[in-house]
Image: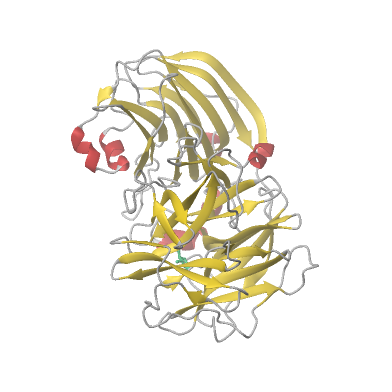
């Protein structure tokens, strides 16, 4: 296998070559799922951005089409940046996107509509001459004004959208209203804003149900709902979200007290996941979120050699946790159609220091689901109060998988070379804090590759799992796909995606293990692992 291909993924979305970033305007329309995304048709570094377009019947197998939107008019000559789709009540899709109108990167909001609604793939898009729809007024920072959301209709019959922005280091979700989708008026106040967060890229705003895991259309309005506002912070390349209420009279979003704005907020993913966007899928009554998973070999040279850069994470169903305090995500069920041969373990003890190989599947391209249990919480280590100020990933750096603990570390060792020169452990570690237990989940890429490069980004990604340990169980699912490990802790309460570039642990030379490096014995209640087929992406 050539260097070019060794790290290509088997079932994660990626085009045959070149650079990709943000997922744009995901939507379902008349039997077809559409995914647009930021794409450089000329190379594998960011630049020359157009909207590439792919379609699918099942979110897994894709057909690549010609770019749908690309710079061609006065109102987008210097760039066609991110945006969203809305399905109008007349069952017609409309796309809003950011156009760059000059070399200074002045940003405006444009629309595009399908040229031919009877083409099932909606290949051609028209950008009417009454664009741009929205230009920045004097109060707006015109080079930080982008990424319009899906529109929702208020009780007053007016459409609303958000445009991400920045004013004096304050991230803003600027609100616009329109009766006809063409004439947009800026509301007096942003829907929400927060100091010192930098520009809010790719905002996403949607209702979630307090009663079920079903999704809700952006325009849904009713009892028993909460709202989610997600922003992507360009300074750190992390996203965060809050859960809150939407005061429709004042057109303000108010995060709950338990949900904080900013760098320390909740994340859809504590790893490599950015510029995400969700949409409502009416077929299966669910909300689905897509996120971009950037490369970690941050020298452009590496990507030029590979000839490609960037993948999309597996589309995830997203819903509100019954606690009302956070979201839960899970790979769309369609992914399971790629499962091939399977191995199963149950009721297996893992003593202190034990590490067992899971054999019989292809460890470089696999789906692994495991439930661990333990008899007691007594051996949980003390949580050092000083760590309260650290990010979870810094705690993971201090308390990695090789440092023996009490209750944990236990979990999976993915993409491991035979003698463990390379490996990515995905594991839990339980701590006793003052009033409660703290469960740390890590996806630690520090030992993921022998490749020496100063520019290699190999973080010990981690997040806390807000889980009730009453039943003394913790579950983990990892999607392992050559250069990505995408993991879901406790049924999707905490998700972490790592991009990794093993040199030895590739294809048939990769191994998968379960391990326990704590003094408390861990039991594998059940482990199901499947080899994963390669999806057709043509
Ligand atoms: N990527 C786009 C912008 C967006 C950023 C440009 C986020 O519209 O703000 O490619 O990754």
Which one is in front, 332 or 156?
Answer: 156
In which quadrant will I find the C terminus? bottom right
Residue 398 appears in view: yes
The vertical placement of 89 against 462, above or below, is below
Which one is in front, 385 or 498?
Answer: 385
Q: How is the image coloured?
A: secondary structure
Q: Residue at x 39, y 51 (%)?
A: 255
Q: Residue furthest left?
A: 386
Which one is in front, 31 or 44?
Answer: 31
Q: Residue at x 43, y 73 (%)?
A: 145
Residue 310 appears in view: no
Expressed as whole percent of the image width and height from the top left, the position of residue 180 reads 63, 75
In this rendering, position of residue 56 left or right of residue 240: right
Which image quadrant for residue 522?
A: top left
Expressed as whole percent of the image width and height from the top left, the position of residue 236 reads 34, 57
The vertical placement of 447 against 132, above or below, is above
Q: Residue at x 31, y 40 (%)?
A: 392
Expressed as whole percent of the image width and height from the top left, the position of residue 412 reads 45, 29
Expressed as whole percent of the image width and height from the top left, the position of residue 450 reads 37, 43
The vertical placement of 1 against 187, above or below, is above
Marks counted in the figure total: 0
Which image quadrant for residue 252?
A: bottom left
Q: Residue at x 33, y 64 (%)?
A: 198
């Amino acid at each position: 296998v050539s260097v070019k291909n060794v790290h290509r993924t088997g079932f994660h979305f990626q085009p045959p070559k070149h650079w990709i970033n943000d997922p744009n305007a995901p939507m379902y329309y008349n039997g077809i799922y559409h995914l647009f995304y930021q794409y450089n048709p000329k190379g594998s570094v960011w630049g020359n951005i157009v909207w590439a377009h792919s379609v699918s019947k099942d979110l897994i197998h894709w057909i690549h089409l010609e770019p749908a939107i690309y710079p061609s008019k006065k109102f987008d000559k210097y760039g066609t940046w991110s945006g969203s789709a809305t399905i109008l009540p007349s069952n017609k899709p409309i796309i809003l996107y950011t156009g760059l109108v000059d070399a200074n990167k002045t940003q405006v909001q444009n629309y595009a509509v399908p040229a031919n609604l009877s083409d099932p793939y909606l290949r051609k898009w028209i950008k009417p001459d009454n664009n741009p729809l929205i230009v920045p007024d004097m109060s707006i920072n015109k080079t930080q004004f982008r990424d319009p959301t899906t529109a929702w209709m208020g009780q007053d019959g007016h459409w609303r959208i958000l445009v991400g922005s920045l004013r004096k280091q304050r991230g803003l979700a600027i609100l616009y209203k329109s009766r006809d989708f063409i004439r947009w008026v800026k509301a007096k106040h942003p829907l929400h804003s927060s100091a010192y967060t930098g520009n809010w890229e790719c905002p996403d705003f949607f209702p979630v149900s307090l009663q079920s895991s079903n999704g809700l259309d952006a325009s849904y309005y009713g009892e028993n709902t909460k709202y989610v506002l997600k922003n992507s912070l360009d300074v750190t390349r992390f996203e965060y979200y809050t859960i809150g209420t939407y005061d429709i009279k004042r057109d303000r979003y108010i995060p709950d007290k338990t949900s904080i704005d900013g760098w320390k907020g909740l994340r859809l993913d504590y790893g490599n996941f950015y510029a995400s966007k969700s949409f409502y899928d009416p077929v299966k009554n669910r909300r689905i979120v897509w996120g971009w998973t950037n490369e970690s070999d941050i020298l452009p040279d590496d990507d030029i050699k590979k000839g490609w850069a960037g993948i999309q994470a597996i589309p995830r169903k997203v819903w509100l946790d019954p606690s009302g305090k956070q979201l839960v995500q899970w790979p769309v069920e369609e992914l399971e159609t790629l499962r091939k041969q399977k191995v199963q373990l149950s009721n297996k003890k893992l003593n202190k220091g034990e590490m067992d190989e899971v054999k019989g599947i292809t460890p470089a391209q696999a789906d692994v689901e495991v439930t661990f249990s333990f008899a007691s919480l007594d051996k949980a280590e003390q949580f050092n109060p000083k760590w309260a100020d650290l990010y979870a990933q810094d705690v993971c750096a201090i308390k990695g998988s090789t440092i023996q603990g009490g209750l944990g570390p236990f979990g999976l060792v993915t993409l491991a070379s035979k003698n463990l020169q390379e490996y990515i452990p995905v594991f839990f570690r339980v701590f006793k804090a003052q009033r409660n237990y703290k469960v740390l989940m890590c996806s630690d890429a520090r030992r993921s590759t022998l490749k020496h490069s100063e520019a290699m980004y190999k973080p010990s990604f981690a997040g806390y799992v807000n889980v009730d340990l009453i039943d003394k169980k913790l579950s983990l699912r990892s999607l392992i796909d050559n250069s990505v490990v995408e993991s879901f802790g406790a049924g999707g309460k905490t998700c972490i995606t790592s991009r990794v570039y093993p040199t030895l642990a590739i294809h048939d030379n990769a191994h998968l293990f379960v391990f326990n490096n704590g003094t408390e014995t861990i039991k594998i209640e059940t482990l199901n692992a499947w080899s994963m087929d390669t999806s057709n992406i043509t």
